Image (tube, helix red, strand yellow):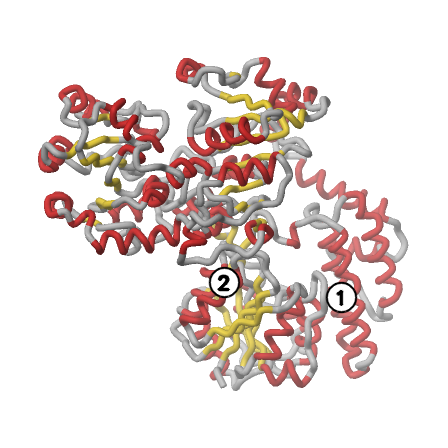
């Protein structure tokens, strides 16, 4: 038997699950089994768990036939546990390094108590919080050997959760301790175990990073489910009624129950204002049924609320809470009010127009901060005109981009009178970046976010650990704007996992593929010929497309990694070098450092201003890049890719990366100019090893690209048809990862 069984119930946490499991399996103490309970999770959690079980024999996976909820999923894991001690870990949280070794040492030192309690820290999406409220109690408890709560009742005030304890398994089984269905399932098990335990020990150590999810946590979702707290405590007091030997615990647990209920009542993100009178009435009913004769409320503000329960209705409680809140905010100053008024003023016009009904035949499109008709939104716009011509598409473009629009494109400029009218009435909103903050999302509107490719570098909330990379970015504002998304389009499961984590918002992932990549998947052998002619590439030349990305560790973002004139010369006269800078560098100093002059001299072609990067990919024979997301799209062409990564360590440290592109590359990797030149001089850039690496890369990152992504989105979201699975042209269908069996499997909610 292992020393520890760690039970991990799993449901809709694919963005956090790997971090959770790694935190257990990478502990220095290895005598542990992990029992992961897949509670019929609708996302990719089941596959992730199976992958871990294949790689590590300490992991066992239970796939439940139906969703049973957190409590009963823990029970299912407990039935399979074989360890001396059982620990529960929620699958969006994770252990701190060295926890299990510290728990094992403390258990040995205290002679295997019934329960060992350890500390936690709240980890918010914007950063780690401070010391927990239990820290003082745990420090005092660690000075003791073991204790029981009859002599030390203050330890009933420890944090009321399942995952901050190690339970002796024989103790749990002997007392039949199991979790009930519904919310607040921790309460009865925690309090029953604490009053039943003869020996409790404390470990003064932070053991769990308790993730405070920005959205999605059920305890922060208002609704009637929070009334589950009442049957949970009814079950606890029914147990106490059958145990006269525990009469001493009734007043203690009665106070704890009332404190918990009143805490929940006061939480705006749990009990809605409309439900508060009913919730308060339930608390009063519980108070009447279970009030112990010797109960004395505490002499504090919470005690005053408890005393009111005996005689006063909800209105009296509300007055008391309101006065306390007023006193707490009276000195806050006027800046918050001013900001609120300012926001309200900006939105007044939109709110007035929002009184008009939505137009089901109106779609707004934008791309790359209103730069023009490009990217995924452009592909969706074209397909909607073909399949849903009754839906009128209007593009939002900057004034300086109007002249570059294709003929016949209806458009508005931001801030114009017509812009405000259309944003108040449009049903469909399509963008590859966030819309500005002023237009509020109206009920019934459909916001489709396409993103700008597959992410290698850190994005959104993940940038909070990279202060240099997020300089100038307001991440909280970015996430508030992302709250408007209804659908997030993904080309692979990697992207789905990243977006779930980087954008902790409410949206549904659609495994559609990238619409702009339809042109690459469906391309014929001659599709790039017209582009070559327009660019002035002579017939018979091998076209090398060089697409570097920006660097966050350098002011301005541009670092000249390659001597372009030297590289063009080394390639030889039978090659043409085409350079495409990152869009953020197009108006910076990068072109003035020699690119413009080299283009003028005919040494290379500067294609930075080409509106459609897909055309450049079709026109090229090989892609040379560093860390640009372009490589994920280019892989659809099944043409060679070379990664020049001479500053990978600096880039990964400053910006952050989701995986090591030098270890999981789509082709050969060069770490110096000499290596780069040798790859092209020898022809190794297109050898069998390059093809093997590219095939593995395509299987992973072109999974849902089958040439029908735009059609899939339009038919599903605009015409209301069923979502089609990837077809024969996709990597999902051709090999590597299996194609989902049905349209339902292509939908996952964040």
| Residue 736: x %, y % from top left | 40, 58
Question: For the residue carrying disc 1, how many other residues have a C-alpha within 10 Å: few (<14), some (14-19), or many (20+)?
Answer: many
Nearer the camera: disc 2 or disc 1: 2
| Drawn side of residue 39 relative to residue 404, left or right | right
Of residue 452 and residue 29, the one placed in the foreground of this image is 452
Tell me what residue is drawn at x 48 percent, y 78 percent.
Answer: 106
Q: How far apart are marks 2 and 1 (CA)?
A: 33 Å
Count residues near mark 2 (Cα–Cα under 10 Å), then give few for <14, some for 14-19, many for 20+.
Answer: few
Ranked by sequence position, the earlier of labels 2 and 1 is 2
Between residues 678 and 106, which one lies in front from this camera angle? Answer: 678
* Percent coordinates x, y for residue 437 in the rendering: 55, 28
- Vertical order, 381 against 9 (above or below): above
Q: Mark 2 points at which residue?
A: 47
Secondary structure beneath dot 2 equals helix
Query: Disc number at residue 489?
Result: none
Residue drawn where x is 51% and y is 54% of the image? 123
Residue 232: mark in rendering: 1
Closest to the observer: 2 or 668? 668
Q: Where is residue 186 in the image (x, y as percent from the top left)?
A: 67, 67
Q: Is residue 356 above or below residue 177?
A: above
Give the structural element (helix, strand or loop) at label 1: helix
Q: Is residue 341 visible?
A: no
């Amino acid at each position: 038997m292992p020393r520890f069984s760690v039970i991990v119930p799993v449901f809709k946490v694919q963005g956090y699950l790997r971090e959770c499991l790694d935190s257990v399996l990478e502990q220095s103490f290895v005598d542990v089994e992990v029992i992961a309970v897949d509670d019929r999770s609708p996302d990719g959690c089941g596959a992730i768990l199976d992958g871990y079980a294949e790689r590590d024999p300490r992991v066992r996976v239970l796939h439940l036939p139906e969703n049973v909820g957190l409590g009963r999923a823990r029970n299912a894991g407990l039935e399979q546990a074989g360890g001396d001690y059982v620990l529960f870990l929620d699958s969006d949280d994770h252990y701190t390094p060295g926890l299990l070794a510290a728990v094992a040492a403390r258990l040995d030192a205290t002679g295997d108590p019934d329960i060992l309690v350890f500390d936690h820290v709240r980890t918010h999406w914007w950063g780690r919080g401070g010391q927990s409220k239990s820290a003082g109690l745990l420090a005092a408890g660690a000075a003791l050997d073991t204790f029981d709560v009859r002599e030390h009742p203050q330890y009933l005030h420890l944090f009321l959760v399942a995952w901050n304890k190690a339970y002796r398994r024989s103790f749990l089984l002997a007392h039949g301790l199991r979790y009930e269905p519904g919310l607040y399932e921790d309460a009865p098990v925690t309090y029953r175990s604490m009053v039943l335990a003869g020996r409790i020990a404390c470990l003064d150590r932070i053991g769990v990073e308790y993730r405070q999810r920005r959205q999605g946590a059920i305890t922060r979702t208002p609704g009637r489910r929070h009334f589950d707290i009442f049957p949970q405590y009814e079950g606890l007091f029914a147990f106490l009624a059958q145990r006269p030997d525990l009469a001493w615990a009734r007043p203690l647990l009665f106070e704890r129950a009332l404190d918990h209920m009143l805490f929940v009542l006061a939480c705006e993100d749990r009990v809605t204002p409309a439900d508060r009178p009913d919730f308060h009435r339930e608390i009063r009913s519980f108070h009447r049924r279970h009030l112990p004769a010797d109960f004395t409320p505490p002499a504090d503000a919470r005690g005053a609320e408890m005393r009111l329960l005996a005689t006063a209705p909800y209105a009296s409680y509300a007055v008391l809470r309101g006065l306390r809140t007023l006193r707490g905010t009276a000195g806050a100053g006027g800046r918050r009010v001013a900001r609120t008024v300012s926001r309200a003023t900006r939105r007044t016009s939109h709110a007035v127009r929002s009184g008009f009904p939505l137009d089901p035949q109106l779609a707004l499109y934008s791309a790359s901060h209103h730069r023009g008709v490009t990217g995924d939104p452009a592909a969706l716009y074209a397909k909607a005109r073909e399949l849903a011509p009754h839906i009128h598409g209007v593009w939002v473009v900057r004034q300086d981009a109007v002249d570059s629009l294709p003929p016949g494109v209806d458009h508005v400029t931001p801030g114009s009178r017509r812009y405000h009218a259309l944003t108040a009435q449009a049903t469909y909103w399509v963008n590859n970046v966030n819309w500005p903050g002023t237009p509020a999302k109206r009920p019934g509107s459909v916001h489709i976010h396409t993103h700008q490719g597959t992410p290698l570098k850190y994005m959104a909330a993940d940038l909070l650990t990279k202060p240099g990379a997020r300089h100038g970015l307001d991440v909280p504002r970015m996430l508030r704007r992302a709250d408007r998304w209804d659908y997030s389009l993904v080309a692979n499961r990697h992207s789905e996992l990243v977006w779930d984590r980087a954008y902790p918002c409410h949206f549904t992932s659609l495994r559609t593929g990238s619409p702009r990549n339809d042109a690459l998947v469906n391309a014929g052998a001659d599709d790039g010929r017209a582009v070559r002619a327009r660019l002035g590439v002579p017939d018979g030349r091998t076209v090398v497309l060089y697409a570097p990305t920006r660097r966050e560790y350098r002011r301005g973002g541009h670092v000249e990694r390659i001597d372009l004139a030297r590289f063009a010369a080394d390639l030889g006269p039978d090659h043409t070098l085409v350079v495409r800078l990152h869009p953020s560098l197009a108006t910076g100093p990068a072109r003035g450092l020699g690119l413009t002059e080299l283009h003028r001299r005919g040494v290379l072609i500067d294609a930075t201003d080409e509106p459609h990067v897909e055309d450049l990919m079709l026109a090229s024979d090989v892609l040379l890049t560093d860390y640009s997301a372009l490589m994920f799209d280019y892989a659809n062409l099944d043409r060679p890719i070379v990664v020049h990564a001479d500053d990978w360590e600096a880039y990964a440290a400053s910006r952050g990366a989701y995986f090591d592109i030098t270890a999981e590359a789509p082709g050969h990797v060069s770490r110096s100019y000499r290596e780069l030149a040798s790859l092209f001089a020898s022809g190794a850039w297109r050898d069998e090893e390059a093809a093997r690496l590219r095939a593995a890369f395509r299987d992973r990152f072109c999974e849902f690209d089958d040439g029908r992504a735009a059609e899939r989105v339009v038919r599903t979201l605009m015409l209301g048809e069923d979502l089609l699975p990837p077809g024969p042209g996709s990597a999902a269908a051709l090999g590597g990862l299996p194609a989902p069996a049905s349209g339902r499997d292509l939908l996952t909610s964040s």
